[in-house]
Each structure stands twice: as structure tokens, then as C-alpha cells.
Image (cartoon, coloured by chain):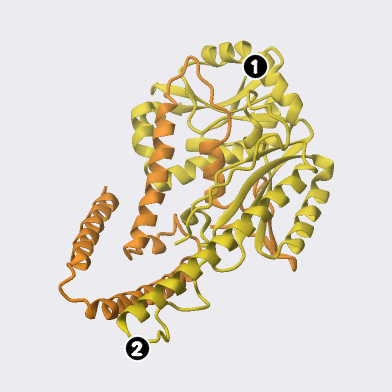
Amino acid sequence: MTTGSVAQTGAGAAQVYGSGYGGGRDPANLGDILERVLDKGLVIAGDIQVNLLDIELLTIKLRLVIASLDTAREVGINWWETDPWLNSNTSRQQDDGHELEEENRQLRERVRELESGRKGRGNSRSDRESRGTARHMDLRDHRAR
Amino acid sequence: MEPHGIWIYAITGRVSAAGLGQLRGVGGGPVRAIAAGELTAVVGDVGLAEFGEQALRRNLEDLAWLEATARAHHQVIGALAELGPLVPIRLATVYSSDGGVAAMLADRDADFRAVLSRIRGRQEWGVKAYAAGRPGPQDAPVGAAAPASREAGAGAAYLQRRRGQLTAQKDARRRMLADAETIHAALCEQAADARLHPPQAPQLTGTKALMVLNAAYLVDDERGAEFGARVEALADRHPGVRLELTGPWPPYSFAASEESEGVGERALRIEARDAV
């Protein structure tokens, strides 16, 4: 999905050529194209058939999708990592996801350890768990939309 | 005949019909010109069953459809940009008649000609800067080797360590933002104009690294190579960030005539997104 000619220079600046102009070359990263055609480019009005508010609606929705993915990551759902549209770098993200999972696991262990010495001090943990489940379901609904 | 609308790709100067000959636009349809005075709107006819308001509402939410349409729109604009200066038009701008398009051209003639003369002989380059290191507290895993002599002591030690990690992260982020500011200022010197865009979400970039700069620069055609070299030199000087150069692009980011602020006048405002 990304461009066919990403040249990694020694300096660490990745140069992506052929992003802009057509001419049969593999075009740019979809995220870059969407950013430009949806968010940049001139907005004009007049004797118009399609109301541009529709587009605003769309970009807002796109952002919401992205935002909900952030939320999803927080609660440990990673289904989008296999979505080819959203992610061209699936395997790498999955690796990262595993590291996050591992850190989450360590944190949970640590919390359990700390809390074991303070029994009877409320049960905020189970509150949090049930909230997590509700969010989880919301996201599933969102995905099924 | 099926009801149709006029989809606009770009506004440009006079173009020959031959130049548009083989171009195919959204929905696979041909591309044609509507002229008024010195200006031309490059358009295509689109069926309202697919590109009407109701249909667009639905189709724009279909990511496969959106991708195909966005790429087709972009491809026409890219091909036209090779013929001469143009004003790229936002995706899904659909007029109901040729007459409406011609009236709009006449109406905003001065605006469009001002934009065209500003971007003539120039191209847009995109530069993004990402955090080069991992943002997380990778060096000192939380919860490892905590002294467990007393409950309170262990908890306090944990919190202190965690706070230290967060502070270090914040400092690193501040340094990267300062790098981004320096880089942006240096690149502005090489450009006729510049625009700062919000950093893209990690899900769109395909990388988890925090994006600290997402900018577009309008660069003279003959200075493109120099600009690229400058980006490389800046990447060398700022190992804390990874720079990515894209382009050349048609001047999407410089299409609006009302945003005529000069290079560097706009303060660098980047919100550091929390990379989870």
C-alpha cells in the first residue's frame, strides 16, 4: 500500500518519491492522500449539488474512528491491527502490541501485589473491570456499524 | 439519461483538450474542461446514483470506495499538475450544471488567478518528523526488582519510579518539539510558503512513533533538490527525530487564497499526542 520507492538514507530521512504526480508510478501512502484530498484542497460553494457539510461530517467520522481506536488500544482490543486499510505495517504493530500487553500484565501483577496488603479498602478494581467491559461492547457495536 | 452532476478536480489556466484526452477520473469516467475567461475548471460527469448527496453520505463511509475515489481524484490532479499550475479542489465537490461551474469561475476569477500566480513554478513538499526512539518506559520495566520490605515502602518506590519515567518522557517530548520547531524554521527559509498540519494519528501513518511535525512547504521547482538535501542535513543534526519527506505534491495545502500569511508568521502549534 505504501509507495514503491521508499529510499532509506543513511541520515535517517525517509524520502518518498512519486507521491504527488501520477504518471503510472505507485502513488503515495493512503493516509497522506486522504489528508490532502479531504482536509486540504480548496472548498468552493455556489450552485452546488453536494453540500460540503457532508464532507465535514465524514472527516469528523474518520477522526472518531481513529479516536475510538486509541480507546480500543487502551482497553487492549487490537482488531484494527489486522485491518489493511488502517495499517500497512501490521506485523510490526502486532509486535508492539505484544510488548504493550506484556507491560500491562506486569502492571496488573504489580497492582495486585500492592493491593493484597490493603484488603477492605474498597473494590475500585472490579469497578474498573466492568467499565472496561462496557467500553469493549461499545467498540464492537461501532465496528459492526 | 441518468441524472448526473459535475465533479470538479481542479481550477487551472487554459488547457488543451488534448492534454485531458486519456485522463480517467472518479468512477472511471472521462475528464473534460469548462472554460470561463482565462480559467478552466477540469471536471467529470458523475452519476448521482453513486455521487449524489445521499449516495455520497453512504459511500464515503465505505473505506474501499473512499480509497478508490480519493486515489482517482488525486491522480487526475497529479496529471494536471504536470501541465501547469492548478488549484486542487476538495474531494466530492459536485455542481449541478456546467453553467454553475462557469459562473463560479467568473465570480472568483481574481482569487483563482492570484493563487495560480503564487504557485506557478512551485511544488508542495511534505515533511513529517517522528520521535526516533520509543516513547514508552522501555528502559526500566515497571514493577521489576522493587524492594518489598514494607508495603508502603514498595508502593512509594513504585510511584517514585513511575513519576521519574513520566518526567523523562515529558522531557523527551519537549526536546522533540523543540527539534521540530528548529527544523520547521530552517525549512521555511527554503520555501516560498509553508503550512502546518495537525499530526496524523498513528493508525493513519502505520507507525506508532509520535508525530511531532506535519508540515507542507511550497518550494520553487528548481530548488526541490536543494530542499531535499536540507531535509537530510537536518535529519543528521537532529537524531532525536526521524524525518520523512514526501512529494512533490500538487499544491493541495496552498490552494486557499484567503490563507495568505507568509512563511513563519504562523506560530508552530503542535499538540503532542500521547502515543500509548
Tag 1 secondary structure: strand
Towards the viewer: B216 or B94: B216
Residue mark closest to the camera, 1 vs 2? 2
Q: Which chain is orange?
A: A
Q: Position of residue B211 (x, y in %)?
A: 57, 55
The answer for how far apart the CA atoms under marks 1 and 2 are is: 83 Å
Asked where in the image residue B144 lies, by quadrant, the reply is: bottom left
Q: Is residue B145 above or below residue A30?
A: below
In the picture, measured across the screen, residue A141 lies left or right of residue B19, that is left
Q: Amino acid at mark 1?
A: Ala
Residue A1 shows in the view:
yes
Residue occupying image coordinates x 41% and y 47%? B63
Report the residue marked by disc 2.
B149
**Badge 2 amino acid:** Ser
Q: Name the residue nearer the viewer: B180 or B164.
A: B164
To which chain does the residue with label 2 belong? B
Give me the residue at 25% from left, 56% from top: A135
Please tell me if label 1 and label 2 are on a single chain. Answer: yes
Q: Which residue is mark 1?
A: B35
Circle 1 residues within 10 Å: few <14, some 14–19, many ≥20: many
Using the image as rendered, state which of residue B220 and residue B197 is in the foreground.
B197
Which residue is the extreme one toward the left? A120
Q: Residues within 10 Å of mark 2 (few under 14, many from 20)?
A: few
